[in-house]
Amino acid sequence: MASDRRETHGEYVSTPTHPTEHDDRWLLNFRGLDVTRITVDFRLTLSLGSEWELEIESPADLLQGPGRTEINPGFRLVPGSQDVAPALLLFGAKVLSAVAFKTGALRLVFDNRMHLVCRSDPSFESWQITGPQGWRIISMPGGELAVWSGSGPRGAPPTDAMPPLGRHLDLD
């Protein structure tokens, strides 16, 4: 697995440059990436740094602080009806953590105290992430993840090739 050396509190640590699989989740190494562009059509797209994109096609929640409460109901983002204006609060924010759960949910935490939570949809692909070297993670209908990875300059995998649900497909 490729890694990168980053300075943390005056020390250099080696961190993976690609998503890392665990039993119940994928840790996405987006820490420090800015939201550099926000676009809206039938989906909400966030560009993270220069190489990663998150496309949200189903309703998602944007929360301020640690989570939803009666006093902090957060904002409901509905990409299909372009009801996503609160997502503009994310422009320029840096990602602190990003986790794709194998249940199909996604959680991103930003340095402006905003949390973006995308859940799976029973009937549709609710979100997908694409990145360098063919990385693609999709929340499949019903709540599993489809994950592709590749190494080298091939770019994204063919869109008609789907790995088995919940499985990781290495293109090499």
Image (spheres, rainbow, N blue to C red):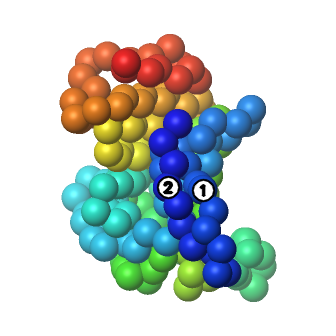
Instruction: Tell me the residue at 58%/55% (across/down).
Output: 15
Q: Secondary structure beneath disc 2?
A: strand
Q: Which disc number belongs to residue 136?
A: none
Q: Is residue 95 left or right of residue 79?
A: right
Pointer 2: residues within 10 angstroms few (<14), some, or many (20+)?
Answer: few
Instruction: Tell me the residue at 67%/80% (across/down).
Output: 9
Q: Is residue 48 above or below residue 132?
A: below
Tag 1 near tag 2, CB within 8 Å: yes
Q: Is residue 131 left or right of residue 95?
A: left
Please say whether residue 49 is visible from this viewpoint: yes
Instruction: Tell me the residue at 24%/23% (across/down).
Output: 158
Instruction: Tell me the residue at 56%/85% (across/down).
Output: 112
Pointer 1: residues within 10 angstroms few (<14), some, or many (20+)?
Answer: few
Please say whether residue 122 is visible from this viewpoint: no
In the image, what residue type sits under mark 1? Ser
Furthest toward the right, the residue is 70
Q: Is residue 134 above or below residue 50?
A: above
Q: Which disc number belongs to residue 4?
A: 2
Q: Position of residue 118 (x, y in %)?
A: 55, 54
Q: Which disc number belongs to residue 14?
A: 1
**In whole angstroms, how far apart are the C-alphas of marks 1 and 2?**
6 Å
Q: Is residue 164 above or below residue 40?
A: above
In the image, what residue type sits under mark 2? Asp
Q: Position of residue 109 (x, y in %)?
A: 60, 69
Q: Secondary structure beneath disc 1?
A: strand
Viewer-proximal residue among 80 and 92: 92
Furthest toward the front, the residue is 11
The image quadrant of residue 163 is top left
